[in-house]
Image (spheres, helix red, strand yellow):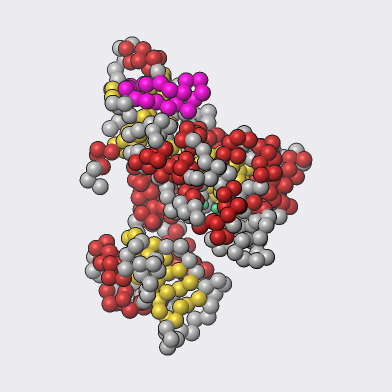
């Protein structure tokens, strides 16, 4: 369905534009918003040839804009058999159904099996079903993998294989491998194998295609992507040329590798569909591995506060990029890592280097209250992913009750006037659907919960602000692109407990309907 001029009418339009926050119609021409509200009706009555999309009271919002995602990894997940909650016979059956009985030389991949439903994974179960085909199944956390004998042979892993950094071969009492590996991605040959796969053009195209399908069905019209690899960027460009992109991307380079970053940034971009994103850095690790850098030690590990990069190290890394007018996105989970970024930003500001709106803190799951005003005054952007709230109890053990309650301080950040945007970090986190993520941010029991209206702002106009594109998207304003999501309900006025039941009815990108629910009922 491609309409040059369309009147969207009979809708609750939440524009995210303070001048005209709620209207009932929008007029779109050539992919842009031309008029809203009464102006839209007047425009339509002016005799111009147009189509009418009667939304029968549905809610139209600016398209969801995910501030941090890993699109190719997302597509890879979408293309794999998901084994969550299955026991061994069910896993074999699921693989057989997905792949058929036998595929010589082709790998069989599965993901998200877990010990709770499959407590005794062993290669012999996989060998029975796949004696000649290598099988690799990643565990729910990603920190373990279950392989068959053929795959172990491929990686030359046997009873004599020594441990690798953080990783090991799990063995039977007789010393033979069970097929389960801990931290498989850190094994040199497996790491090389993964990298080869990630740089394969066909893999990239297939994964992107799957990710785009899932994103448009979830109402996402823009993503800020940890692209990193020139091969992925090339696949994005090919898909754009073929008219296959249904979501706008900003593509981040990987700052921790000088060569990779420069190769990536030399590529050609396209300001409308796949723009140049910030340079990505890491300041610390993660909560789950107790490697996020905290001011006070972990509650369950005496003396361990995690670790990360100092302010001086951070400043040194980002300075050359900021000087070139690039923005930098720095992964920081713990409050100490966030503080080091503040200190680095202060040092650079004093040297006359612009950090305002050019330095963003990714995740910022724990922030010391005393740093919030500094973040605002320095103009640092907070890029949060409320999908981390999926399991609110998981942080209590490692942070202690009080710190866990003050984590993800969205309320405090918004009240202080910090620019806060939302996204998924999928598949680093387990949820990519904005409706579910907004539900979590609004329905948490912590005093840091926010309203649906605020969450919606964070997922639209604030993500555009963080991307530096709020002049052209993020709100339904004449002159901006016609990127919309149509929802079954107005999530700002329904019972917050029901937000997650809201359905995406249409996704519109550049005035073109790229997803309509009724066309997908069979899927
Ligand atoms: Zn991260
Ligand atoms: Zn990430």
Q: Nearer the viewer, residue 120 or 200?
A: 120
Q: Nearer the viewer, residue 18 or 268?
A: 18
Q: Residue 101: image x %, image y %?
A: 23, 69
Magenta residues, as a range? 4-25
Could you tell me which residue is drawn at 27 percent across and 61 percent down? 98
Residue 382 as seen in the image, left or right of residue 127: right
Residue 262 visible within the image: no
Residue furthest bottom as drawn: 174
Could you tell me which residue is drawn at 66 percent across and 47 percent down? 368
Residue furthest right as drawn: 350
Picture layout, residue 131 above or below residue 509: below
> Does the magenta-highlighted stretch encompass residue 14?
yes
Residue 73 as seen in the image, left or right of residue 186: left
Picture layout, residue 406 above or below residue 469: below
Q: Residue 271: image x %, image y %?
A: 49, 36
Q: Residue 249: image x %, image y %?
A: 46, 42
Q: Residue 287: image x %, image y %?
A: 56, 58
User: Based on the displayed image, in which of its 4 quarters is residue 349 positioned?
Assistant: top right
């Amino acid at each position: 369905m491609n309409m040059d001029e369309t009147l969207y009418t009979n809708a609750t339009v939440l524009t995210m534009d303070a001048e005209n926050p709620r209207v009932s119609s929008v007029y779109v021409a050539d992919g842009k918003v031309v008029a809203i509200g009464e102006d839209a009706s007047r425009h339509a009555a002016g005799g111009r040839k147009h189509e009418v999309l009667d939304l029968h009271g549905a809610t139209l919002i600016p398209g969801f804009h995910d501030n941090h995602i890993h699109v190719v990894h997302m597509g890879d997940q979408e293309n794999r058999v998901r084994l969550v909650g299955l026991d061994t016979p069910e896993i074999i059956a699921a693989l057989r159904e997905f792949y058929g009985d036998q595929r010589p030389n082709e790998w069989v991949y599965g993901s998200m099996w877990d010990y709770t439903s499959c407590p005794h994974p062993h290669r012999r179960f996989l060998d029975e079903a796949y004696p000649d085909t290598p099988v690799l199944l990643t565990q729910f956390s990603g920190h373990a993998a279950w392989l068959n004998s053929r795959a172990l042979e491929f990686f030359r892993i046997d009873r004599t294989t020594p441990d690798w950094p953080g990783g090991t071969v799990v063995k039977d009492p007789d010393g033979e491998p069970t097929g389960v590996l801990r931290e498989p991605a850190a094994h040199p040959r497996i790491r090389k194998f993964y990298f080869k796969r990630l740089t394969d053009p066909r893999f990239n195209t297939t994964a992107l295609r799957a990710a785009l399908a899932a994103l448009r069905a979830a109402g996402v019209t823009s993503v800020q992507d940890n692209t990193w690899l020139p091969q992925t960027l090339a696949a994005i460009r090919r898909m754009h040329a073929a008219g296959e992109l249904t979501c706008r991307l900003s593509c981040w380079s990987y700052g921790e590798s000088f060569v990779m970053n420069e190769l990536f940034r030399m590529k050609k971009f396209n300001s409308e569909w796949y723009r140049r994103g910030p340079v990505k850095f890491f300041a610390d690790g993660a909560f789950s591995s107790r490697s996020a850098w905290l001011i006070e030690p972990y509650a369950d590990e005496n003396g361990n506060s995690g670790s990360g990069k100092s302010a001086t190290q951070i400043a040194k890394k980002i300075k050359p990029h900021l000087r070139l007018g690039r923005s930098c996105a720095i992964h920081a989970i713990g409050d100490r890592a966030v503080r080091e970024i503040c200190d680095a930003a202060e040092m650079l500001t004093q040297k006359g280097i612009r950090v305002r709106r050019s330095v963003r803190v990714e995740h910022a799951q724990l922030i010391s209250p005393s740093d919030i005003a500094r973040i605002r005054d320095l103009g640092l952007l907070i890029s949060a992913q409320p999908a981390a709230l999926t399991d609110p109890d998981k942080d209590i053990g490692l942070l202690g009750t009080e710190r866990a309650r003050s984590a993800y301080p969205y309320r405090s950040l918004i009240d202080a006037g910090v620019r806060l945007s939302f996204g998924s970090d999928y598949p680093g986190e387990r949820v990519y659907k904005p409706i579910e993520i907004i539900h979590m941010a609004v329905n948490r029991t912590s005093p840091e919960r926010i309203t649906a209206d605020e969450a919606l702002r964070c997922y639209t106009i604030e993500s555009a602000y963080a991307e530096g594109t709020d002049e052209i998207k993020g709100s339904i304003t004449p002159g901006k692109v016609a990127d919309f999501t149509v929802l079954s309900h107005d999530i700002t006025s329904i019972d917050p407990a029901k937000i997650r039941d809201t359905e995406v009815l249409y996704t519109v990108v550049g005035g073109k309907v790229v997803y309509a629910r009724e066309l997908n009922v069979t899927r």
